[in-house]
Image: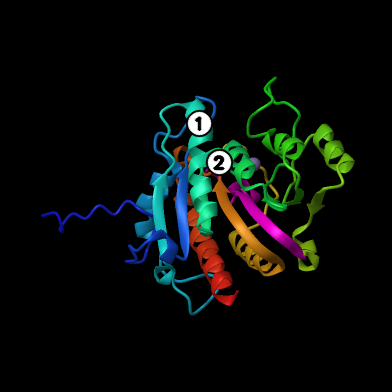
Amino acid sequence: MKDLLPLQLDLSLSTFRGEVDQADVIVIGVPYYIKASSFNPYIKASDALRIMKNYVEDNSLLFQDRYYSSIKILDLGDVYSRDYDAIQTDIATIVKYVIKRKLKAIYIGGEHTFTYYLLKCYKPDNLIFLDAHLDMKDSFYHDKFNNATFLRRINEEVDLDIYVIGARAYSQDEFEYVRRNDNIYLLDPKDIANLDLRGETYISLDIDILDPTYMSSTVYLEPGGIDLDALLNLLKTILEKVDYICGFDIMEYNPRLDRISDAITVLRIFYEVSLLLTLKRINR
Ligand SMILES: [Mn+2]
């Protein structure tokens, strides 16, 4: 009976169940939201994706002869915290473990705010920030720390270069802040060909970089975005241009708003990134 009903709530499509050091990629859920809003999901984004993985086909969209089931993905589950105050410490514990073993980790959100805690641990030389917004307001609704401000807090607290790609919605204050800071670059997707990043690079992907036509399961919808094909090819080019990826996150998918299986789009992105990280690892 036990074998008839295997518990399969994990994101891997392969039968790999080995040790962390043998995995191509590990995945960790960070499925938290700061505010108890009406948009709070009733199921964690990471669990929604783990369930919906059974509906994703195996073929890579970027590489005709590659299959997701060949990637040795190890799903470590979610960062589990008893209360909000504990999340920061718990994320730090997990990230320290990941960094020490030099694991290729993809984190699945949750609200973009939690990238703050990840970046505070990684302290990368470069951050590539793929987002429809700048997330660099000084405060938002009289609140200094949330998903519209956290990147400004990071820039105040961590010494790094920030490359923003896909931003198309921001306030005057945010834009002027970017212009005042010579370590922040606003890039158009076509500028990526000239990118050559040394040192450690962290990549943070807010799924709202996609146009709402292709991705509406997120709270702040912003028209004028790119499609899935353009995003995957952008990620492929970025990974070619970057020397070393220390961490990757995919944030802001909200299953509560998902009525047309946007989960499949998020999963496709997740598996393509896993594949790109795996191929980069092999080629090093
Ligand atoms: Mn964002």
Task: Let me know if residue 208 is in the magenta part.
Answer: yes
Q: Outermost residue toward the left?
A: 1
Q: Residue 191 appears at what percent x and percent y? A: 80, 62
Question: Does residue 215 appear in the picture of this structure?
Answer: no
Residue at the (36%, 53%) spot, across then down: 10
92 relative to 83 in the view: left or right: right
Q: What is the span of residues highlighted in magenta in the rendered image?
A: 196-217
Tell me the element at label 1: loop
Amino acid on which disc 1 is placed: Phe
Q: Outermost residue toward the top?
A: 142
Tell me the element at label 2: loop
Residue 228 figure quarter: bottom right
Q: Residue 105 appears at what percent x and percent y? A: 52, 55
Q: Residue 242 appears at what percent x and percent y? A: 69, 64
Amino acid on which disc 2 is placed: Thr
> Disc number at residue 284?
none
Q: Outermost residue toward the front?
A: 100
Other residues around mark 1 within 10 Å, as few (<14) / some (14–19) / many (≥20): some
Residue at the (39%, 45%) spot, across then down: 47
234 relative to 31 in the view: left or right: right
Task: Reply above or below: 32 against 67.
Answer: above
Q: Residue 138 appears at what percent x and percent y? A: 76, 29
Label 2, on which residue?
Answer: 218
Per the model, the C-alpha gap separating discs 2 and 1 is 9 Å
Quarter that holds the N terminus: bottom left
